[in-house]
Image: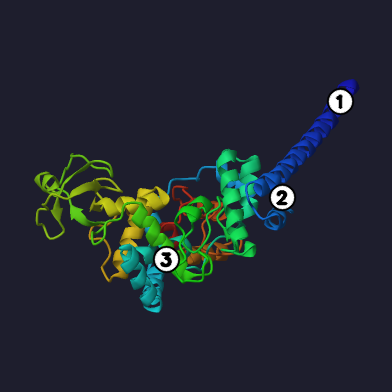
Amino acid sequence: MLAFQRLKCLAAVFAIAVSAGSFESRAAGFQSCIENLKAQAINAGVDPRVAQAALSNVAYDEKVIRFSTSQPEYKTPIWDYMAFLVDDERISDGKKMLRKYDRTLRAVERTYGVDRYVVLAVWGVESDYGQETGDFFVPHSLANLACAGRRAKYFRSELFEVLKIASRGDVALKDLNGSWAGAFGQTQFMPSTYRRLAVDFDGDKHADLVRSEADALASTANYLRKAGWRKGEPWGFEVKIPRGYKGPSGRKRTASLSTWGKRGITALNGKRVGGGTKAALLLPAGRNGPAFLTFRNFNAIYSYNVAESYALAISHLSDRLKGQGAFSTAWPTNDPGLSRAQRLQLQKLLLRAGYDIGEPDGKVGPATRAGIKQAEARFGMTQTGRPGTKIYRALGGR
């Protein structure tokens, strides 16, 4: 028995030694990759001083790699997504920005033919009108993804592009903060998109989407125009579908408005739709929720983030900024989503109830979801971890 215990101890020591050696080997390999990236960047045309300053102290970032490989804990219901992206605060702030940047937005609309309210909505959703552009230093994130991520070639190319942006003096290296995936600026462009579509709209000879609102808004309009935006056309509109509708739907299944009319689709006022314009029927929450006929401009918005929920949020926010109301048809749920202010309040209520979720910031991460599950269990509710109205009210939210 004693000999067996000795063997176990020796095996454990050996395993620790192998693990330590493996870690040191991986660390050395990572640093070697970073050094190679530095040399490759310079060969690709990056200013050596920029390459040195950007890549001298790159450390392995577990968070970046985890974000690049992990899936969300649950698929966000469309009513949750819309509740925090198109809330009263974002609408109110957007109207203030509309007044403040009225001249710039009108000039952008004249130049690119893109609805200024849509451009403003992209700005609002992507960075809360420039207030939240991201917490990751983009060169370090992209270097991590190039050396330890799944799509090394793609992220290496993006890294070189962002370093060239700094080399040209368009954006200062210290200002290159953005998402874990490398998007940055007030309207969140990937570096390669920046190279292709960023424009200098304020006339200072630099396309700076970080510090120049004019450049950011114009670049977004330029993106949408190149994505197929048609001047003067709407993104779409809410409609009614007949009870028991079993016809086609989906963004790619287009037909003329007259065809949709023959299928029983009507405007909210009950008038049958008609005309030759091609449209698609979007049912983001199924046949019992709001329904929309969407046009080509909706697809242009969709291309910005390749998600129908995103495109609908941008489209709806742009309408709300114009003074239009909320959707006529309610979402098919008895547990609506929460606004950002309510999410922040929910976190405070969880803390007050004794659940350790960290500092409240309105952003629902793993700790908040864990706290919600504990609170749901306490109230005899199904444990979902979802920030909805039911758990909010159960904890005392109003």
Camera-near label (1 vs 3) is: 3
Q: Name the residue that disc number 3 marks.
A: 217
Earlier sequence position, callout 2 versus callout 1: 1
Earlier sequence position, callout 2 versus callout 3: 2
Q: Name the residue that disc number 2 marks.
A: 59
Mark 1, residues whose alpha carbon is within 10 Å: few (<14), some, or many (≥20)? few
- Above or below, 216 relative to 227: below
Q: Name the residue that disc number 1 marks.
A: 5
- CA gap between label 2 and label 3 equals 34 Å
Which residue appears at 41% of the width and 70% of the height?
89
Secondary structure at numbered mark 3:
helix
Q: Position of residue 255 (x, y in %)?
A: 18, 43
Camera-near label (2 vs 3) is: 3
Residue type (three-letter) at the residue carrying disc 2: Ala
Secondary structure at numbered mark 2:
loop
Secondary structure at numbered mark 1:
helix
- Is disc 1 in contact with disc 3, using a CB cutoff of under 8 Å? no
- How many badges with numbers are in the image? 3
Residue type (three-letter) at the residue carrying disc 1: Gln
Q: Is residue 218 visible to the viewer in this orientation of the structure?
A: yes
Mark 3, residues whose alpha carbon is within 10 Å: few (<14), some, or many (≥20)? many
